[in-house]
Image: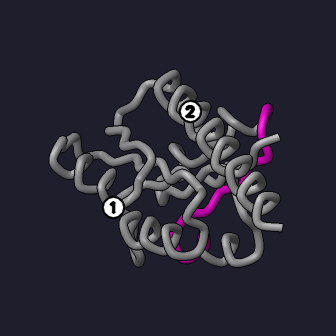
């Protein structure tokens, strides 16, 4: 079973995404990037979905933290700004996907499914590499 961390300061969106994935996956949520980092310091997740603009640390800063601490974990950015240039910049920084708000739930489900598969593939690659070096 995959584990999903939802990070958004908007309780409605955070709860909606949590409910969307909680039936099929282990799901946690955080209202801020700082809360998310506390969870990430003790647990790893299959995928992280984070808002871009939040009080305190932003989704960009959380993405940077993830690339340093858990580089194989896909990070999906959601944002109220539909800006293709910003989306491309975030993908270059290591985001797995960028979904502008308002988003269709089907789009989020598809992105998360792709991210879970991507994570599974990376995990298998690491296991093969580790076995080959033994």
The numbered disc on residue 114 is 2
Mark 1 crowdedness (10 Å alpha carbons): few <14, some 14-19, many ≥20 = few
Q: How is the image coloured?
A: one colour
The alpha-carbon separation of the residues under discs 2 and 1 comes to 18 Å
The structure residue drawn at horizontal position 59% and vertical position 41%, both measured from the top left corner, is 118
Mark 1, secondary structure of its residue: loop
Q: Is residue 83 above or below residue 9?
A: above
Query: How many numbered marks does the figure carry?
Result: 2
Q: Is residue 39 magenta?
A: no
The structure residue drawn at horizontal position 41% and vertical position 43%, both measured from the top left corner, is 97
User: In this figure, which residue is indicated by the disc labeled 1?
Assistant: 93
Give percent across and percent down for residue 64: 42, 71
In the rendered structure, which segment of residues is drawn in magenta? Answer: 23-36
Give percent across and percent down for residue 61: 40, 73
Mark 2, secondary structure of its residue: helix
Q: Is residue 64 above or below residue 88?
A: below
Badges 2 and 1: C-beta atoms under 8 Å apart? no
Q: Is residue 64 above or below residue 86?
A: below
Of residue 29 and residue 121, the one placed in the foreground of this image is 121
Of residue 3 and residue 54, the one placed in the foreground of this image is 3
The structure residue drawn at horizontal position 22% and vertical position 40%, both measured from the top left corner, is 82
């Amino acid at each position: 079973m995959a584990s999903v961390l939802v990070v958004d300061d908007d309780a409605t969106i955070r709860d909606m995404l949590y409910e969307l994935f909680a039936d099929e996956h282990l799901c946690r949520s955080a209202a801020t990037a700082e809360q998310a980092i506390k969870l990430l310091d003790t647990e790893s997740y299959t995928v992280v979905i984070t808002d871009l603009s939040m009080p305190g640390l932003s989704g960009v800063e959380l993405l940077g933290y993830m690339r340093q601490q858990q580089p194989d974990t896909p990070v999906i950015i959601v944002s109220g700004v539909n800006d293709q240039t910003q989306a491309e910049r975030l993908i270059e920084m290591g985001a797995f996907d960028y979904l502008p708000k308002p988003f269709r739930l089907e789009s989020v489900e598809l992105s998360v499914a792709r991210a879970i598969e991507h994570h599974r593939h990376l995990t298998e690659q690491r296991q093969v590499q580790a076995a080959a070096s033994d």
